[in-house]
Image: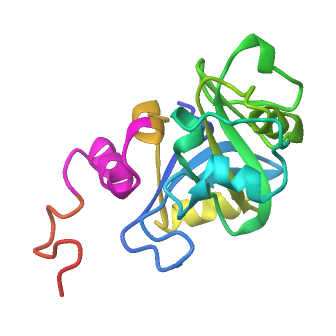
Amino acid sequence: MASEPLAPGLLLAAPPLGDPNFNRSVVLLATHGDGGSLGWVVNGAELVTVGQLLRDAGLVAESVTLPTDGSYSLSARVGGPVSPRSAWVLYRRAPRFEHQGEIVLSGRWAATGDRSLVEAIARGDGPEAFRLILGYAGWAPGQLDEEIRLGAWMPAALDEEIVFQTELSEMWTRAYESLVGVSPFAFTSLKPGSA
């Protein structure tokens, strides 16, 4: 019986992973194959709001007034340690945003590093819902499989509610509970933040 493909899917950092780049991380794994693997830490550190980031980067024309609600009001996030200045957009799919370089994540969501979509967002003409991520997580061929085998990562199915509707501070715990069926704290007396 063939195993389920890892991507698109989620990777949960096993407690404790030991790598400060990925402690309690939830990675949205977009691609996994002979050429390696690519994904984004979807509960990564928050930066400034999307609107502020686009203005600070000089991408918003003076004549443009960006929306101050919806996806524009959300914080851009650190998506991983690789190419931290690269911009990625996770977005609700729509025919007018389809392009050759998009990575289909589900029937409703896709991702791209294509600058044209970032420019559309900077004009206030972006997708209905999106997340702006800086940097990504990448693995060489075979590296992720080995890390999973060693217990560093727990693969899980893509859960759009966890990725796009859960508070960052709760994302890893919710994903763990969904995968394992119990709280990650059920096996220990330690609570987050306890000594």
Residue 169 counted in the magenta span:
yes
Q: Is residue 3 visible?
A: no
Looking at the image, the residue that sits furthest to the left is 189
Residue drawn at (54%, 51%) of the image: 42
Looking at the image, the residue that sits furthest to the bottom is 195
Quadrant of the drawing holding the C terminus: bottom left
* Left or right for 87, reference 39: right
- Which sits in the foreground, 33 or 8? 8
Residue 175: x and y, percent?
A: 36, 47
Image height check: is 24 above or below 110? below
- Which sits in the foreground, 58 or 116? 58
Q: Quadrant of residue 73?
A: top right
Residue range in magenta is 165-183
* Left or right for 61, reference 174: right
* Left or right for 117, reference 100: left
Count the marks. 0
Residue 142: x and y, percent?
A: 72, 59
Residue drawn at (65%, 31%) of the image: 91
- Which sits in the foreground, 128 or 107? 128
Looking at the image, the residue that sits furthest to the front is 63
Q: Is residue 38 visible?
A: yes
- Which sits in the foreground, 45 or 150? 45
Residue 22: x and y, percent?
A: 53, 69
Colour mode of the rendering: rainbow
Q: Main secondary structure of the magenta part?
A: helix
Residue 43: x and y, percent?
A: 49, 55
